[in-house]
Image: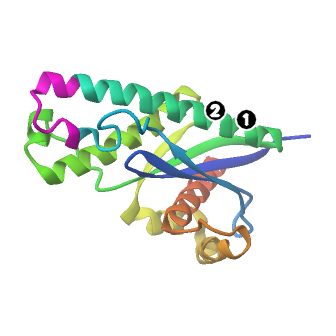
Amino acid sequence: MAMKRTAIGVRVHSGWGALVAVAGEPPEIEILERWRVTVIDPDMPGAKQPYHFVRECAVGQAEEHLAACAKLAEKLAHDSIRGIIRELEGIGYRVEASAILLASGRKLPPLAEILASHPLLHTAEGEFFRQAFRKACEELKVPVEGIRERELEKRAGAALGQSAARVQRRIAEAGKTIGPPWTADQKLAALAAAVVLQEKHRR
């Protein structure tokens, strides 16, 4: 039996990500499963907010701590996504694409500037954990694409066409059958997954 196509959407927070797997053709998309993937060791000092933790450190010390946190985050993301891929394959679905929701997408300045700016600490941490998921997907040979949240609805309109509104309603109402948690995290991740799955199919 041929494997069915699926994509995974990811919305990231400090230390974890909400992941949703979506399959099917619009507007009849199918939400297969959702996961909360933790990418920190809660016992590791400063793991959840690594940039905040090193804001008073010298740049060299900060780099060492951030590198250690990144190595662990990437491993945990890799192991979790590998398990998710195997789980989906076990029920007949092949992961063909993934999407990670982005904030502004601006390029970050050098580390010394980040450490001197509280707003940039938050920005850098968001990008830090997105990178862990991105690298995990790349290592697992899953095509991964970043989509800015503010552009998601427009991107959905282009990818899903006349089905876009129906897909969004289907996602919004999915919590009634799936149950909690079904928050903005899961809804946005699901829509991003539906978008890249359809774009992949068109190519």
Depth order, front residue of 163/91: 91
Classify mark 1: residues with Cα within 10 Å, few (<14), some (14-19) or many (20+): some
| Cα separation between marks 1 and 2 | 6 Å
- Above-or-below relation of 180 to 22: below
Q: Quadrant of residue 48?
A: top left
Depth order, front residue of 108/80: 80
Magenta part of the protein: which range?
52-63
Q: Residue at x 60, y 43 (%)?
A: 97
Residue 158: image location, x then y, percent: 52, 65
Indicate which disc residue 86 carries.
1
The N terminus - image quarter: top right
Asked if the residue under mark 2 is in contact with the one under mark 1, i.e. CB atoms within 8 Å, the reply is yes
Residue 11 appears left or right of 14: right
Q: Quadrant of residue 91?
A: top right
SS at circle 2:
helix
Residue 112: image location, x then y, percent: 9, 34
Q: Residue at x 12, y 40 (%)?
A: 115
Depth order, front residue of 130/79: 79
Indicate which disc residue 82 carries.
2
Q: Is residue 53 magenta?
A: yes
SS at circle 1:
helix
